Image (cartoon, rainbow, N blue to C red):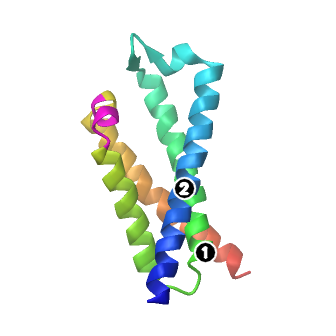
Amino acid sequence: MITGTWIAVALFLGYLATVACALMATFALASASPGMVSQNFRITAKYKWIQAIIWLLCVIVGAAVTCAVAEGTSPWITQGGMIAGLIAILWLNSWEARQRGVAHQILMSLVSVVGVIVGYQIADRLLHL
């Protein structure tokens, strides 16, 4: 029971770190260059690519947080849970999915998987130096 609770806390904190990082980066970029982010109330193609890179970095940070908090628990469960959660929320946000398009949604899903794996590996190595 305690392990399940600990994993849930780790996943929540990892998700929170990911979203906070993404929001800060998005707000900073939108403030610095609003015309690059959107035109005619649509997200620009250039911003979609930048957003994928930002998302990758933010997911790496969130996965590292999850790994650090969930140390000693099953990495398969924590990584799988974080990947499933990020992709589910990505696809359930219908407004953003329509803005991005299916191809970009698939790219963001793949970026989420790669980011979780990379972030978890980095954190695991740092924790076991």
Give the quarter of the figure containing the N terminus: bottom left
Magenta region, residue range:
93-98
| Residue 54 on image: x %, y % | 55, 41
> Residue shown at 52%/54% (left/top)?
59
Magenta: main secondary structure: helix
Give the quarter of the figure containing the C terminus: bottom right
Left or right: 67, with 129 as reference point: left
Q: How many neighbours does mark 1 have within 10 angstroms: few (below 14), some (14-19), or many (20 or more)? A: some
Q: Residue furthest right?
A: 129
- Residues at circles 2 and 1 in contact by the CB criterion of under 8 Å: no
Q: Is residue 57 above or below residue 127?
A: above
Q: Indicate the secondary structure of the residue bearing disc 1.
A: helix
Q: Amino acid at mark 2?
A: Leu
Task: Report whether residue 118 is seen.
Answer: no
Q: Is residue 41 above or below residue 14?
A: above
> Residue shown at 34%/62% (left/top)?
84
| Image quadrant in which you'd find residue 23 | top right
| Image quadrant in which you'd find residue 16 | bottom right
Q: Amino acid at mark 1?
A: Val
Left or right: 85, with 115 as reference point: left
Q: Nearer the viewer, residue 75 or 23?
A: 23
Q: Indicate the secondary structure of the residue bearing disc 2.
A: helix
Left or right: 48, with 109 as reference point: right
| Residue 57 on image: x %, y % | 57, 49
| Residue 74 on image: x %, y % | 46, 84
Residue under circle 1?
A: 69
Left or right: 22, with 32 as reference point: left
Q: How many neighbours does mark 2 have within 10 angstroms: few (below 14), some (14-19), or many (20 or more)? A: some
Residue under circle 2?
A: 16
Q: Residue furthest top?
A: 40
| Residue 18 on image: x %, y % | 54, 53
